[in-house]
Amino acid sequence: GRTAEILVATDNAGLWHSPDLGIHWNRVEDKTGFLTQESRVYAAFYSKSQPSVLYVSIATDGGNVVIRSQDNGVSFTEVYRVTGSDSAIRAVAVDSRFSNQVFLGSRDGALFETSDGGGSWRVRARFDDQIRGILMDRSDSSSFFILLESGRVYRTKNSGAVFEEIEFDTGSDKDANVIGAGLHSVTHDTVPTRADISHHDVVPVALSHAGD
C-alpha cells in the first residue's frame, strides 16, 4: 500500500511529496507545466484504488484549476477551472473504490462531484460557509465528512444525498440543519466565472494520504 506517503500543498512553493513519512521530500513538477516550484497549491489527493492517479487544485494566472495526473504526477490534464476567488476549490477527495469519483469543496460552500474523472461536474450540496476539508471514511466510501471554515462538521452516510451536522458537545447528531443534495448539474464548460484569484485568498494547507 501507500501508507507512508505524504503530500504537502504550499503557498507559492509548489506541491511536495514524501514516500517515507517525511524523511525524504521531492517537489512534484510536471512536464505539462501546470505545477512549478512557485505554484500556489490549495489541495491534493491520491486515489486509493489507482495509486498513480492524483488530483491537485492550484492557482494560475487564469484562475483556479483542478488538474489530474494518471502517471503519478509526471503529467497533468485540466479537469476543472474557475476564474473567481470566491469559488476557488480548497478541498479535494477521491472515492476509495473508484478513481473517477471525485469531490471538490469550494470557497463559496459548493460541493462538486464527478463520476467520470472530471468530464462533467454537478453540485452535490451547498453549505453556508467555505469548505476547508473533505474527509473520506476509509472503510465505507459512501460515508464522508465536510469541514467548514467556521469549524462546523457535516457527515453523510449515503454518498452526499443528505448531510447532518455533528454536535460535538453532546456526541450526538443534530436533528435540524440537514442539507439535501442534487441541487443542479454543471459541466466543465459551463462553470461560472468571476474575478481573478488574488494573493490574499491563498492559505497554506497540508494533506497526508494513507492508503491501504
Image (cartoon, rainbow, N blue to C red):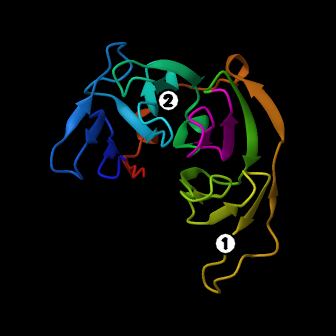
Marks 2 and 1, the one that precedes in the sequence: 1
Q: Is residue 148 magenta?
A: no
SS at badge 2: loop
Residue 91 location (% of width, % of height): 52, 44
Type of the residue with mark 2: Ile
Give percent across and percent down for residue 61: 43, 19
Rendered location of residue 104, percent (x, y): 60, 40
Asked which quadrant contains residue 113, the reply is top right
SS for callout 1: loop
Q: Who is closer to the viewer here, 157 or 175?
A: 157
> Residue 197 bears which disc, if any?
2
Residue 58 tag number = none
Residue 89 located left or right of residue 113: left
The crowding category of the residue bearing disc 1, from other C-alpha atoms within 10 Å (few below 14, some 14 to 19, many at least 20), is some
Instruction: Point out the stretch of residues depicted in magenta.
Output: 96-116
Q: Residue furthest left?
A: 23
Q: Name the residue tied to disc 1.
A: 166
